[in-house]
Amino acid sequence: MSANLRLMDSDGGAAPAAPYRLLVVGVGGGGCRAARHVATLLDQGPTVVAVDSDDQALRETGLPVQLSIGRALTRGFGAGGDAAIGKIAAEDEENKLRNLVEGMDLVFVITTLGGGTGSGAAPVVARIAHEQGALTICFASTPFDFEANRDKDAAQEALRQLRMHSDATICMPNQRLLEIVPDQATLKSAFDASDHMISMAVIGIWKLLTETGLIRLNFSDLKNLVENSGGACSFGYAEGSGPDKAKQATQALLASPLLDHGNVIAQADAFLLNILGGPDLALLDVQQVMSNIQKVARRDAKIFMGATIDDDWQGRLTVTVLAAEHWVAAKPMIGQPSAAPAEAPAAVPAAVPATPEQAASAAAATAELAQKELIFEKRDRGRFDKVEPTLHGGEDLDVPTFHRRGVKILSDRT
Ligand SMILES: Nc1nc2c(ncn2[C@@H]2O[C@H](COP(=O)(O)OP(=O)(O)OP(=O)(O)O)[C@@H](O)[C@H]2O)c(=O)[nH]1
Ligand SMILES: [Mg+2]
C-alpha cells in the first residue's frame, strides 16, 4: 500500500463490530466534504474514505483514510473540471481502489457532479465496488441551473455512468437546495444543508443495519429494494419531536422537496421506510407514520418498513425513505426461486392492533409490505426491570403481549 493511502490505525476511531461491512467513499471536492460530515455525525460509524486528485482538498477533509488519485496527470492539483481526467485518475489507481472496497457488503459513493474528479472518478469507484460484490449506492448532486451548460452536460453524463455501474444512484439536484434553505442563505450554507441531507441518508441506513430493531429491516431487504430499483432512487427524511413527533415527521416528510412534496412516495413502485426513535418510541407512533404514508402511497406499492431504537433519539423521531421509482422484478429476489410468483393485490399484514383506531387503519390500508417478516426484537422489561414479575400462567405480564407471544407480522408477498 503506497504512502498516499493512509489506513486507519488501531486508535483511529474504527467502527464497532457491525453485522455488515460498510464503507463510505467521498469522491472529489464536494463528495469528500459530504463524506467528512458523515464521519463527524457518526463517530462510531463506518469507515469513511476521501478520494480526490486535489491533495490540498484531500488534506482539508482531515479524514483518517485518504487516497490521492491521478498524481502523475494532475500533480495533485485536481482535474480542473475535466471529467475525462478524473476518469483516468481513478483508473490509474484501480488496484488501490479495489483494495479499499474489497470485502465490503455495502459501499456508499458520495460525489458532487459537474467538476472533473467527482464526475469522472466516481463512476469508476462505483464500478469497482460493484465488481467486488458490494451493494453499491451512490449519492450524487447535480449543478445549479445557473452553472455552465458544459458542467451540467458533464454531470448528466456522469449520472448516467453512475447509474450504469451502481445498484442505485440517488440524485440530489442542487437546485432543490433553493427550496430548502432560506432565501438569504449563502452558497456555503446551502452546500452544508446538502451535506447534511446526504449524511442523514447514510446514517439512516447505517442505523437501520446496526441498531436494535423494534421492527427490523435487514440487509437483504435493502438489497432487494436497491437491486430491483432499476438504478434510480430518491431519498427523503424528516424529523419530529415531543408528543406529536410522529405527526410532525410525517407531515414534514410529505412536504419535503427531496421527495417532490410527496409525489415521489405517491408514484413509487417500491420504497423502504425506516422510523428511528428513542426508547420511548411507541407502537402507536409507528402505526401513525405508516398509516399516513400508506394513504399517499400507491395501493400496489411494495413497502419495506423498519423501526429502529437509538438511546440518543429519546423524545424525537426521524423518518427516512429510500424510494424506487421503478420496480424491475426481473432478477430473482432474495430467498426466492427465480420464477417470482405472480403478483396479487395484497392487504397490509395483520399488525398488532392495540386500539380500535389501529385496527381500522390497518384494515383500511392496502399497500403491500414487501419484506417477508417484520421481526420484533426481544426487548428488556423496561421500567419493570427491577420489579418483582407479575406472573400468571407461567407468563410475565409486565412484558408486552406481542413479545411474550412472539408475534411476527407476516407478509409473504414479495
Ligand atoms: N451539494 C454540494 N455541491 C457542491 C459542493 N461543492 C461543490 N459542489 C458542486 O459540485 C460541482 C463540482 O465541484 P467539486 O466537487 O468541487 O469538483 P471536483 O469533483 O472536485 O472536480 P475538480 O475540482 O474539477 O477536480 C460544482 O459545480 C458545484 O455545483 C458541496 O459541498 N455540496
Ligand atoms: Mg476539486
Image (cartoon, rainbow, N blue to C red):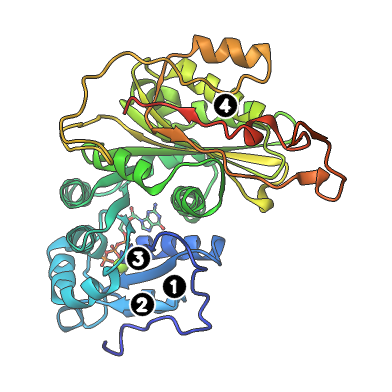
Depth check, front residue: 92 or 281? 281
Above or below, 413 relative to 235: above
Precedes in sequence: disc 1 or disc 2: 1
Q: Residue 289 carries which label?
A: 4
User: Where, by quadrant of the figure, is residue 25 drawn?
Assistant: bottom left
Callout 1–callout 2 Cβ contact below 8 Å: yes
Query: Residue at coordinates 26% horizontally, 87% vertically from top-left?
Result: 1
Density class for disc 3 (Cα within 10 Å; few <14, some 14-19, many ≥20) is: many
Q: Distance between the residues labelled 2 and 4?
A: 40 Å
- Which numbered disc flags the more N-terminal residue, 1 or 4? 1
Secondary element under disc 2, as helix, strand or loop, is strand
**Cβ–Cβ below 8 Å for labels 3 and 2?**
no
**Ligand 1 location (quadrant):** bottom left
Q: Mark 1 points at which residue?
A: 61
The reply to whether the C-beta atoms of the residues labelled 1 and 3 are less than 8 Å apart is no
Instruction: Tell me, yes or no, if residue 130 can be seen here.
Output: yes
Give the residue pinned by disc 2.
66
**C-alpha span from label 1 to label 2:** 9 Å
Reading the chain from its start, which is encountered first: label 2 or label 4? 2
Q: Name the residue under label 3.
A: 29
Place residue 33 in its image quadrant: bottom left
